[in-house]
Image (cartoon, rainbow, N blue to C red):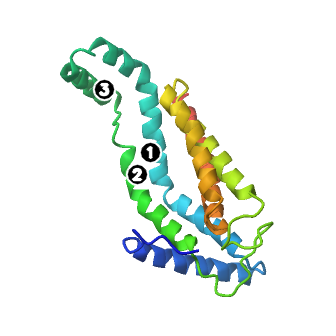
Amino acid sequence: MEEPGIFSGIFAPIEYLMNAVLTALYSLTEIVGMPSYGLAIILLTILIKILVYPLTKKQLQSMKAMQRLQPQMKKLQEKYKDNPQVMQQKLLELYKKEGANPMSGCLPMLIQMPILMGMYYTLFSFDYGGAPPSFAWLPSLSEPDPTYALPFLSAATTFLQQKMMSPDDQNQQMKVMMIVMPIFIGWISLQFPAGLVLYWVTMNVVQIVQQWWTNRQDDKEAV
């Protein structure tokens, strides 16, 4: 499968680094007597998620803070709907009072994006160097999953991860996206190499665990 090359040059340094680390992790699996590129992909994904966890935690806490302020924000928006300037001023005062920043959740996401794109380009057409690219039920990590199990898992974990991040009182547009996005992810996963989809599923699972842990710690601090 030919690698999409629109932005591949931009992320080439990260792609080179990811390629080297993935190869090193495969060598590690050889040392322990379990040579597997599938296991190496899982280990690399977990390693990346651990390294960026401080950013992930900041992003999750920011989103949770904004969700907590939603009722007050709606009241202000309704009260000053005919005066946008005053409404904006009141919202800024609310953010300052509660120590929240609607933009603070975007920065960690932007910082992580080059890493995610680097992994995407690394795994889209990774050269397995003649090693058996099979893993678990997958006959080849370089080809789409013929059983459709990974595409289903990619859709299911995407849905669960979105649901954990969504407020209880989400609007209709968000509810639609909760359905459309997992279906879209599952559909494109039917065409992607299994190694890339394995990375996506692992990333979602680790994100779900990290989100659960962050919420648990925040709840403990709030008591």
Pointer 3 with pointer 2, Cβ within 8 A = no
Sequence-wise, the earlier of marks 3 and 1 is 1
Say the numbered circle drawn on residue 59: 1
Circle 3 crowding by C-alpha within 10 Å: few under 14, some 14–19, many from 20: few
Q: Nearer the viewer, mark 3 or mark 2?
A: 2
In the shown orientation, is residue 38 left or right of residue 51? right
User: Residue 134's spot in the image, x, y percent?
Assistant: 75, 74
Q: Residue at x 51, y 61 (%)?
A: 51
189 or 135, nearer to the observer: 189
Q: Nearer the viewer, mark 3 or mark 1?
A: 1
Locate the N terminus by quadrant.
bottom right
- Residue with the mark numbered 2: 108
In the shown orientation, is residue 79 left or right of residue 7? left
Type of amino acid under label 3: Lys
Type of amino acid under label 1: Gln
Q: Is residue 29 above or below residue 118?
A: below
User: Residue 169's spot in the image, x, y percent?
Assistant: 52, 23
70 or 10, nearer to the observer: 10
Q: Quadrant of residue 223?
A: top right
Q: Is residue 219 above or below residue 48?
A: above
Type of amino acid under label 2: Pro
Q: Is residue 81 above or below residue 68?
A: above
125 or 14, nearer to the observer: 125
- Residue with the mark numbered 3: 97
- Is label 2 in a helix, a strand or a loop? helix
43 or 184, nearer to the observer: 184
- Spatial CA span between label 3 and label 2: 23 Å
Q: Quadrant of residue 217?
A: top right
Sequence-wise, the earlier of marks 3 and 2 is 3
Say the numbered circle drawn on residue 24: none
User: Residue 45's spot in the image, x, y percent?
Assistant: 59, 64
